[in-house]
Image (tube, coloured by chain):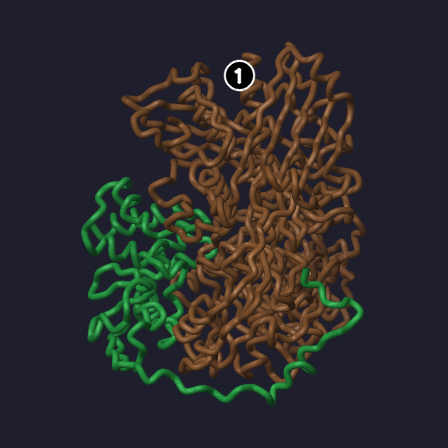
Chain colours: A brown, B green
Amino acid sequence: MVTEMTSTQDRTNIQAKTGKNIDRVDGRLKVTGEACYSAEFPLEGIAHGYIIQSTIAKGTIEAIDTSQAEQLPGVLAILTHQNAPKLNSLKSKNFGGGYPGENFLPLQDNQVHFDGQHIGIVVAETYEQARLAASLIEINYDEAEPMFDLEQALEQSERYDPGERLQPSWGDIEGGLQQAAVTIEETYTTPLEHHNPMETSATTAEWHDDELTVYDSTQWVMGTRGMIARGLGLPEEKVRVISHFVGGGFGCKGFFWTHPLLAAIAARKVNRPVRLMLTRQQMFSSCGHRPRTVQKITLGADNEGKLTAIRHHTDTETSFVGDHAEPCGNITKMLYACPNMEIKHQIARTNTGTPTPMRGPGETSGTYALEAALDELAVKAGIDPMEFRIINHADRHPQSDKPWSSKHLIECYQRAADAFGWQNRDPRPGSMREGDDLIGWGMATATYPGYRFPTAAKAQILANGKVIVSSATHDLGTGTYTIMTQIAADTLGLPIERVKFELGDSKLPIASVSGGSSTAASVSPAVRSACEAACFKLIEMAIADNESPLHDYQAEEITTEAGRIFVKESPEIGETYEAVLQRHNLPLVEAEISPQDKGSRYKSIAARTKPGIVEDEGGSDEFAIHSFGAHFVEVRINPRRNQVKVSRVVGAFDVGRILNQKTARSQIYGGTIFGIGMALMEETLLDPHSGRVIIHNLADYHVPIQADIPEMETIFVEYPDYHLNPLGARGIGEIATAGIAAAVVNAIYHATGKRVRDLPITPDKLL
Amino acid sequence: MSTPDSNRHFSILDQMPIAEAPNASLGSDRTIAVKLKVNETEHELQLEPCVTLLDTLREYLGLTGTKKGCDHGQCGACTVLVEGERVVSCLSLAAAHQGEEITTIEGLAKDNKLHPMQSAFIKHDGFQCGYCTPGQIMSAVGLIAEGQAQTDGEIKELMSGNICRCGAYLGILSAIKEVKEVTA
């Protein structure tokens, strides 16, 4: 239906707005407090829910005494496994390209699998009453010995087998090590970490007879709809999920957890809308985390610095109620050229909540270990760390031998190094000082796959001159509202003000989870095609209309710009969109683009953490599609305090075409800061006796604050990647978090001569 | 493991007919009268003494621009001005502010014209998800009104009670500096 006629090549104005520094179109709503997040929809007669959580990590609930709580004023209902409805299993069900976060359904039996498990919900007139009532419920447990020490679990606990996909190897690893002139073998650990978006997960559920509307803070409205419908035994069309604004996600709102089901059940029970907003404390056991990893890396290089062997063994964990594999070795097998490779993952089940993707799952933990180890090997080989990486550059994908769709990593190294001043680095540890401060310079490579998932979009050109474009995607602060508005405006040659982009509603054309840095690359082409298709309908109408100046022209002769359709060769012959619609007495013309069937070309986000679905590389049949980047970091350490201050970061990124300089830069800054937190401060601790989560607030779980923020410079080497999509854009949300922790760690070594291999690097570890 | 019989289909409609819903229960009889002036509008409320200023704004007055990020005074998302001073409203009981004048994010723009700090946050992209933004802006407005923060380092230190997990800190700093220069 869309002809070549309206494709980009014919456009002079396609770059008018796309790529520019456009302010966020949702900015005004956000700075005035009018943006409505999921716990903020004003519904008549709303009641408030409060979750009851287990206070043991493993065992059986023997008795629940709700009598005291029930007598409190305002309490409407208390649901536990003793009176909750039976739900339908979500296990192994694919909900449009994804899976639930875990196989666990709430309130179905008396078993406790982890600390903080949702074991009931109180509903009351007010939040205060619900919270008080929850505190008065007495629960007796038959407590069992929980399994939560990772080392012990790897020896004694059940394993989760992620399948052969995560255990690739090629060449002869022992032979490669024997050829090596230098080798290292070290173990790197990362702690349990939490996403901690500023908005806690929240669901407001409202029933109208047998129809359910759910306002949910989710990165995936279509999946949430499917899973709620399945769990409750409703047809999908009876459930609507709305998520207009998401107060940050970073992965913990990407899959499906128990609270939306609990809110829906509670609302049904009291026949009123129920608002359930998790507390910050509850966020530490309700919606996933980055699991602990122990990564043993063995590397060998010859006299020229060429890698002869890479072995990367990851030990990590999942829960007893969900299957998550943190795929740390996935980047190792693609980042450098090496003839001998061995990647392994062992996953033990522990009595923790189910882990889930957190900004760069696998990429972030994995690049930390690999890039720190490479630094150690480069130092041992006496080669500059950047030079060492260039020597080992992978010109093709090392495993599949496919060519890269678009790779400019060497340019990233060079441009970032120049901007940073890397040539002035004295390689000797502790050699650079300013006053009392030790100064360290470190660098690392960043990478992230380029994903694109099937997406639909609809465009409506209205008789009043406005355009409404929509897709059931999301804006987590990532800029989706803004960049899709830019693309639609450019496609039709309209000012931004005349275009409105709608998202976050399961009634809109289908889109996939906003995870895997996929949204920009997936939704942009659908938005553009939908706009082109709607415009083409107008052109057809005009050609057929003998009152139109375009009557009897051929479609191929006509183009569009600035809200007009006109003859390419004679732009004065033409008319506005409104003129066509008004003459036909039509309120609008619309077109919807369906998700094209791309077979295995567009991979499911779930594929990376689930076994045996599809191969796990971003990419197509012909090309390996990845983004790349380079981080250069300066740290300052006062040797008396051992406190590390990251003072300067320069990064260069090869992420395809930039759709909005302003929002893209913000994504890179944010991802970098996220990784600085990982390097220096973030860690959730479990009590060594009970396995309970003992870090569960923002005073104890440290995230970077304003005073921690370095000077930052971001460079985009802009090479559009048309193999991923016709706009040439690859995702940008996660790449900056990959590699940055290693760059910080490597800078700390350069400053101090100390190799700390256990994150986070708190001052005690530098004593 | 909680895996119900996969052959059976359970319907919530069969198990929970709406007709069996409980009657609305009475509210608490332990409320007190609280008078607040929020964004120049007087409000008289009956509240339990334990209700925080934050929950009063969000749940009783429908002013959801003030955000709940931690409810423990650790993140700054709920920052409002009370009598012109910055307060984390989650650590403050409504009843403790009888008759006091409170400014929230909804009260900053006048006659549909944004406050300079709001415009500067948009211009410098001082936010991503937007959830910490009202607190950041109220804190920034309070900071400038207090006449504090002469240097970048001081602004950064004094804005460190407001967490932004998206990491929009550079834009936030630029926005504050710009407004400070204009108003200086």
In the displayed structure image, the side of residue B117 where residue A209 appears, left or right = right
Near-viewer residue (A76 or A272): A76
Depicted A366 relative to depicted A607: above or below: above
Depicted A60 relative to depicted A353: above or below: below
In percent of width and height, residue A95 lies at 72, 61
For the point 57% across and 63% down, the residue is A501
Placement of the C terminus of chain A among the 4 image quadrants: top left
For the point 74% across and 23% down, the residue is A340
Residue B116 seen from this side: yes
Chain for mark 1? A
Depicted A46 relative to depicted A456: above or below: below
In percent of width and height, residue A494 lies at 56, 60
Q: Where is mark 1, residue-wise?
A: A379
Residue A465 seen from this side: no
Q: Give the image quarter of residue A718.
A: top right
For the point 60% across and 83% down, the residue is A208
In percent of width and height, residue A321 lies at 65, 55
Q: Give the image quarter of residue A510.
A: bottom right
How many numbered discs sit on the rendered protein? 1
Depicted B137 relative to depicted A423: above or below: below
